[in-house]
Amino acid sequence: MAILELQKINELNDFETDWNQLLSHSLDNNPFLTYEWLTLWWKQFGNERTLKLFTANNRKGSTSLIVPIMYSPYKRFGMKLTKAEFIGSPDSDYNTFLLTNYLEASKCINPIIKSIMEDLNDTDSFSLSDVPEDSYTTKLLQNVNIDAGEINPLISNTCPYIELPKDNETFLQTLGQGMRSGLKRYERKALKDHKVEFVKYDKMGSTRKAMEIFFDLHQKRQKQKGKAGVFAESTNRSFHLDLAKAFSEKGWLSLFFLNFDDEPVSSIYCYEYNKKLYFYLSGFDPQYADYRPGYLTFKNIIKYGIENGLKEFDFLRGNETYKSLWGTNIRKNLQFKIPKKSLGAKLYNWTANNSTLPHLYETIAHPNRLLKWTTQAH
């Protein structure tokens, strides 16, 4: 078994084909683990962070496990600290390892975790968030054995999803009577007043143009709600423009529009990956709110998924009320905080979770500061 550490993003660029081939055989596989998502995210957000990929190979040279980790600087109590976490946090809705053989991976996960911990100071943190509860990554982490003690996961997010049936009528029957009646009413009203079309992004011109229209619809809705919106930030726009182009080339982009009289009034931005639809964001023009264009868009994208033989529509993170209207199941995301053994680490973690004790760690860990403070006080 060999554990390699790649510290620069250009080292990752050398094995795009190998990464995607490994991912196609990984027991955990989602769009947030793709080469495209990770490298494009790093391009926009990797500043001041350090990248390391811990790779475990068997004796034959085959890769059984890749743990993608970044070291992010942050401050707490005025101290400069480092946090070890998944690459893409907090923007990736699901974080997992790339693992092709569970038994082999289980033999090397402990030394990999130990290597990461050795990179950190006592007061640095090591937290792996948004790990799906039903993933093999969770199974691996639950069996990690470290000197500092057990790793007890916390629930970090809930992720509603729909198991898609074989036909649309079966799905509609799973909805409540009020929801079914409302959808029919809104659809009749829209068809009466407008020419209504549900179209994919390639009908809107270039991928870039379609994304710009989507940005505008999303921002209009967020502005109405009194929020800044995700795409108020230029880095977010740049990331998703690059990502949409790359995902489109792979056949993973499911960006759809609801048009009234050839004008887009609603949009939904999804990833179609590994027989699932992953819903990332949506938006609509508030002046058409009486038609419930968001509901009609969701109805059509779910129908699209069913007609194309997809097995799941994943709403991703968040328990917003509108998601429950679609008869959703719930998947939990977990957070694994890796504890450190030292007294200083335990004191720091304790005070970090107690806002009324902001200086306790400083005074205990550095008694000369306590002496200085008491001298000044008297």
Image (spheres, grey):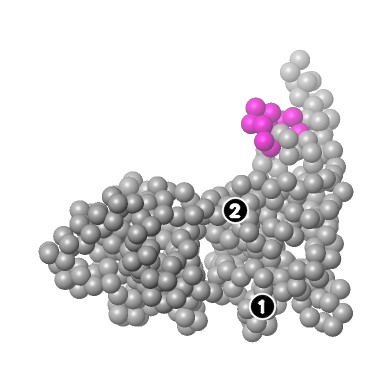
Residue 188: x and y, percent? 17, 62
Q: Secondary structure at mark 2?
A: strand
Q: Amino acid at mark 1?
A: His
Q: Amino acid at mark 2?
A: Asn
Looking at the image, residue 254 lies above or below residue 337:
below
Outermost residue to the top = 378
Q: Secondary structure at mark 1?
A: loop
Q: Can you tell which quarter of the image residue 32 is in?
A: bottom right
In the image, 106 versus 113, the foreground residue is 106
- The disc at residue 236 is none
Q: Label 2: how many residues lie within 10 Å, few (<14), some (14-19) or many (20+)?
A: many
Q: Is residue 8 magenta?
A: no
- The disc at residue 25 is 1
Outermost residue to the left = 193
- The disc at residue 333 is 2
Q: Decide whether the magenta segment is chiefly helix, strand or loop.
A: loop
CA gap, disc 1 to disc 2? 22 Å
